[in-house]
Structures are given as C-alpha cells and as structure tokens.
Image (cartoon, rainbow, N blue to C red):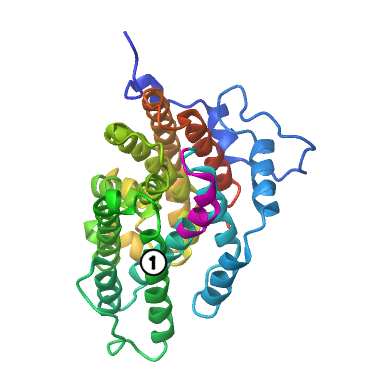
Amino acid sequence: MVRTATDAASLQLSETELRSLQSLNRTSLPPAPPPKANRDGLPSPERVEWEIQEMLATEPGPDFLRWVDEYAAVGKRNPYLWRWCRRAVELTTLSSVAAEWREELIDTKTLGVMWDVMLDDVADRGGDPRMLEMLLGVMEGTAVASFSDCSAAERPYAAFTVRLWKEIESRARRYPRFAEFESLLRFDYRQLANVMRYSHLLNRNLDLLNLSEHDLYTPHNMHIMICSTFDMMCSPGFDRRELGLVREMVWQGQCMGRIGNLVTTWERELGERDFTSGVYARAVSRGDVTVERLLTAAPDEIRAIIQNGGHEQYFLRRWRAHQRRLTVRAASIHSFDAGQYVEGFERLICLHLGSRGRK
C-alpha cells in the first residue's frame, strides 16, 4: 500500500532534523553548490548560505529596480526584500513559460508580491480600514481610486499602490492566454483580498485567533497560486486538462511557502505586535498563552513561550508533509517539468531560513 504524507510517522522530525533547520550558522560561500540536504533530507547550513549568496548575486533589471526606487519613497521595507522576492518567484516559475515572456513575467509577478506587501502593511499594522477597502475595491472592480478619505501622509502610499495594481493589470492583459485564464486570476486575487480583510479583522479582534482559520486563509497571502495562473497565461504548451492537478500541486507549494515565511518572520512580527502568525494561533489553541497575555506580556516572555512550546517545530514538520504531497502530485503532471518545480520549493525554504532578521 502506498503511504501518504498524512501518515502520523511522516510528521515526525528528529532532533537532528530540527537542529538542521533552526541552528543555521553563517558560513563562507563554497566554490561549488554544496549538497542540497543533509542525510536527513533537510537543507544543510552550507546549502542555505549558498542559496542566499546566489540570490544576492542575481541582479534585477532596470525596469524592476525603478519600481523598487519608487517604493522606497513611500514604504519602509528593507530593499533586501525585493531582491529576495524576485529570486523566490524565479525559482518557482513553471518551466512551461515561453522564453520570450519569462523575464518580464518574473518582474510582473514580483510587482504583484510588492502590491501584496503594500496591502499587508495596511492590514497588519493598524492602517485605516477605509483605505484598505478602497485599495481592495480598485482591484476587485467595485471602487474607483479616491484618496479623499486618506490622510495627507497616507495619500502617496495609496496612490503608489493603485498605480502598481494598474501596471500589473496592464501587463497581464498582454499575455497570450490572458482571456483564457482571466476569470481564474481574478478569483485568485479575491482570495488574497480575503486574507487582507481577515488579517485586519484579526489584529483588531485578537480573540478570533485560531489555528484552523490561520491554515485556511493565510496561505493565499503567499501569492503562489496567483503566480501559477500568470505562468499558465504565458505557457503555450500548457494542457488545461491538467489544470485541477496543477492547482492541487501548487496549493501544497503555497502552504510550504507560507510556513517558510512564518518561520522567517514571526519574531520580527512579535516586535510589531502583529500576532497573525500561526505560531501564536497554535500557542493559544494549545493553552500555552492567552490572548490577554499576548497583548500585555513583554516580547521576550512571548518568544520563550513560542520556543519552549515547540510551535515553530510543529510548522516545520508540516512543511515536510506538504513537501511529500507536492512530490506525489508532481508525478502526474506532464505539461511542464514538475520535478524542477518541486526543487524550486526545496530551494525556497533555504532562502527563508537564511533570511531571519533580514526582511
């Protein structure tokens, strides 16, 4: 009988495996790619560092860098993030994308991630709900860009976010199979809008915090389903009869991406009093901390609760389970090199683990 990733044994990690993922010492870049993983199948510290250095050595084009410069005038994220995001998008792009569209498409999808971050920073950092709804409404086609409800300080930020969305939409319309997949793309973006509304609601009503809704909603914030739909728009040889299989495969990758993001950012978010991360949802659901304590305790106390409760390790085990499901589903795909796609997510976790405190 074929054993699946839902078997209880598949969710267990040894102490060696956990140390491989969590205790990553910075090392010098080796002259050639080190082994992808230790004997336990998880990324070695050397491989993590190699992937980070490969990312840093990848120079984006001038058109993309122009958007990065414009973001810097209104946003506060470290420029490292945008180089990181573009590399992540590149690693997880379907091999079926036509060569003549590939570089522009990677830029477009990364601009989509930038737009995602713009909204996320409004939703998670106490932004004005009217501005959030206006920005989402522009994307959904239910509102026009109006900055009358924005403060003078908010207007440049909102205006840039709207202009960024219009650029993404304009580019998408040029892609060869846009008409074929337009409705799917809009559906995917509406799932992202739902995450923004959920995050904003949760940060204002922390007693809503629970693990089930975290797992149901927040993976869409990773933009990975959206990216796959963009890829299909630029893949002349994609067989749409595989669409359901591909979506199921990509969902596993999206969950892996969410876990990698969670492991990378939960400590930074603790300092920002943003408790939408799954580690906090699990800590509350397990009774290790109350919502009231999250709101009042010192960051060091909450950090100790998360670390001592094994909540990060729980999600790393979940990453392994999704990895196995992704690999199983990939074996059924013929429209592109699904093995390369699986490898892209194994490289992506290296970028996540090597970026703690950097983005």
- Could you tell me which residue is drawn at 47 percent across and 43 percent down? 97
Q: Residue 267's spot in the image, x, y percent?
A: 49, 56
Tell me if I can see residue 240 in this picture: yes
Quadrant where the image shows the N terminus: top left
Going by the numbered disc 1, the residue's amino acid type is Ser
Of residues 288 and 225, the one drawn nearer to the viewer in this rendering: 225
Question: Which residue is denoted by mark 1 in the rendering?
Answer: 170
Q: Is residue 208 magenta?
A: no
Count of numbered tags? 1
Which residue corresponds to the image point at 34% horizontal and 40% vertical from the top-left? 251
Identify the residue at image location x=52%, y=32%. Answer: 340
Q: Range of the magenta residues?
A: 96-108
Query: Which quarter of the image is occupied by the C terminus?
Result: bottom right
Q: How crowded is the residue under tag 1: few (<14 C-alpha within 10 Å), some, or many (20+)?
A: few
Q: Would residue 317 appear left or right of 90 to someone viewing this image?
A: left
Q: Magenta span: helix, strand or loop, mainly?
A: helix
Name above or below for residue 144 compared with residue 82. Answer: below
Tell me the quarter of the picture where residue 350 sits. top right
Closest to the observer: 250 or 271?
250
Q: Is residue 273 visible?
A: no
Would residue 30 be found to the left or right of residue 224 on screen? Answer: right
